Image: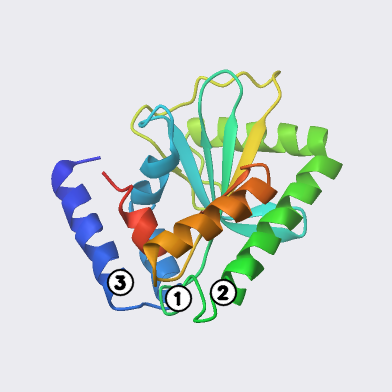
Amino acid sequence: MNCTLHRVLKQEIKNLIDNKAPERDIQEFLKEGQNMCILAEVYANPKEEYIIFSEFPIGENKADFVIFTSRSKMDIVIIEIKGADFYFINSDGTISHYINSAIQQIVNHFGHIRENYEYFRKFVHTARESVEKGMIRYNALIGPRGFLYCDPCKEILYRGVVIGGKTRDDKIESKLKWKMEESYNYRIQLESWDSWFSKVI
């Protein structure tokens, strides 16, 4: 990503977080132009090898964002986001129902993939190949490398990320996240917008 563009995007997303923007405003910002790259580059590995989609279909539902990345076995990162207009943790120390709702969305996505694994595996590789050939599928944005070194004959890996809310107490939030992530065998990563922003390089 161009360094100047990165600085601009980083400042703009910080402004949205600081101003406690609702989900709709954050979604609109991320889907505009090249803006999805700031989300993709947090999770892509290698950094410049990714395809990111918005409103990507998974069964009868759609994920907010989905990232294809990695080499050999394709790694699929399914992202559900919520707004920055609430706290990740309620005043009584429980997790926000907005976050729980997003977790359930991820769980539902996992269920569909597991029950339709071979169909989904072929579907995502078809989508990948189409984008690499220059077609726009599901608002796709491809990373600087222009393609992925993924083998369509190998199994796919998939995991989830939930981003939402503001940090109320970092220590309490970190402990709660750890317990929740452990309960899902670390296949779902939980972030407040504050903790996610700290990962933006």
Query: Element type at marker 2?
Result: loop
Between 192 and 102, the one lying in front of the other is 192
Mark 1 nearby-residue class (10 Å; few <14, some 14–19, many ≥20): many
Q: Residue at x 30, y 52 (%)?
A: 198
Residue 196, quarter of picture: bottom left
Instruction: Specify the label residue 96 is tagged with.
Output: 2
Residue 115, quarter of picture: top right
Q: On the rendered image, what quadrant is the N terminus found in?
A: top left
Q: Amino acid at mark 1?
A: Tyr
Residue 130 locus on image (x, y percent)? 57, 35
Please give the residue where the numbered disc 3 appears in the rendered image: 16
Report the mark closest to the observer, 3 or 1: 1
Residue 57 locus on image (x, y percent)? 67, 53
Residue 199, compared with residue 82, is above or below; it is above
> Mark 1 or 2 closer to N-term?
1
Query: Element type at marker 1?
Result: loop
